[in-house]
Amino acid sequence: MSMFSYFKFDDRTDPKIKTAARLSFLAFFGAAGWLSSIINFSRSVLELDAFNFGIVLTVNETAVIFGFIISILLAYISESRLLGILVAMAGTALILCAFAEFNNPAFSFLYTFVGKYVSIATMNMAMFAFLLSLSVEYFETTRDSLVKHSTDSGYTAVVMGKISAFSLLGTASGYFLVSLLGFLFSPKSGFFPLEYFYFLLYGILGLPLIVIGILSSKKAVAAKALKEHVEFIIRGKFLNFYILTFFTASLNIIMIFFGAFFLVDKFSLSPGFIGLIFLLHSALVFFLRAKATEIMKSKGEDLTMKIRYIVSVVFFAVLIISAFDFVDKDSPMKYVLLGILALYGTTTLFDNSIKSFISYFATPNEQRSNLVIYTRLNQIAKIIIPILTGWLWIQYGSSAAFALGAIFSAICLIVSFRIYSAYNDSDDGGIVEEG
């Protein structure tokens, strides 16, 4: 099967689905470009410290709380039209990010209230990040709803797989663009001043989203959105599942975002290198995901969990050592860390083992509920952990932040050693069979 077949739809596919797939490419292209550039931009241009960077990440994730806004909009706007609006919103947020260091008269009242606690750049960046997150987060929700309501149930999985391919391609393209431009217009070359680089970058990222999003919204046909309900079930027997979910999400945040922030803060790595980390991370996840699933099924979820968390502890230990003064700015250790952060993507492939393992011991209703809880716990971690890690960094140094990640990894490792016996010896009698 040709790789290009993933991007082709057959004749029975609703045109709205094809448009949603193309918009998915754009949405993830913009989000990936922002994600891989925000670290250098925050530290090198806006001069944010780890705590203020953590504030930006936390506010970015609070967008998940405002899902009711999308519900209200869907009462008046069709799903297909809303997709175009959300993509245009994301493009607008990207372009606004380039102006984050400037005073904005529209936000003067916020500066008055919180200006003594955080910088103007932090407030601006946090608000624009929130707008971007709100756009992309609910783009996915609206798109998936459109697919479910516009395709036959037997064809839905195929369509979702093809749209996922568009999303992955968009993500890789965003990372590649940042890496390419970062190397071409490296601050060391003196060819393009760093403060102007991000106007170019965010313009290239944002303008296509605005133009195509608006055009797509105007062409969209009205269609009524439907509501779905999933029963919310919390069970004490799934405590280990909840612990692994929350702490795994937490250590991922510390490793990926604050690990990259550390490379910029201590070693002054250019946007090209940081973009390369995310690009390699994405490529490894894409090409090794099938192999990871095969290993997980052949060796067992509990074993892959143990290996995943042991590797995480080792990686955090290397970061802690690198934070000490005897590792200087010009040390080749920065390239070791670059490789570690890129390779870390292979460990996140085994995070699905948490959901896979727990499904053996859950009824169908409990499985559906656990998927919702899994998402919510990830969202809670993304809101709490960035600002907590940033505070630890400021108070006790970067080594304390990475020590927190090591502790989270150790907690997950301990749980992974006892999780199988805990469920195998449960009062429910072990594995739940469906059907």
Image (cartoon, rainbow, N blue to C red):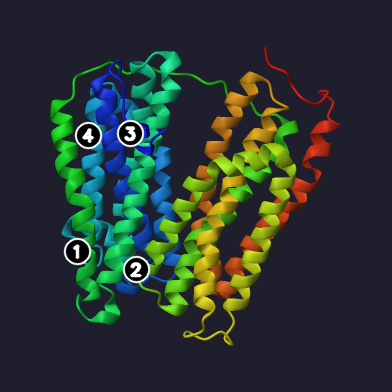
Q: Amino acid at mark 2?
A: Pro
Residue 46 drawn at (x, y percent): 31, 70
Residue in the image at 37% along x and 24% along y: 145
Answer whether residue 116 is visible to the viewer in this image.
no
Instruction: Give the Cα separation between the discs numbered 2 and 4.
Output: 29 Å
Q: Give the structural element (helix, strand or loop) at label 1.
A: helix
Residue at mark 1: 199
Asked which quadrant contains residue 236, the reply is top right
Q: Which residue is mark 2?
A: 271
Q: CA distance from mark 4 to mark 1?
A: 24 Å
Identity, as a three-letter code, of the amino acid under mark 4: Gly
Q: Nearer the viewer, residue 61 or 170?
A: 170
Horizontal side of residue 251 vs 100, given as left or right:
right
- Judged by depth in the image, the label closer to the viewer, 2 or 3, is 3
Q: Which mark is residue 84?
A: 4
- Residue shown at the point (30%, 41%) measured from the top left: 25
Which of the two discs, 1 and 3, sits closer to the camera?
A: 3
In x, y percent, where is residue 223? 25, 17
Circle 4 — which element? Answer: helix
Of circles 2 and 4, the one toward us is: 2
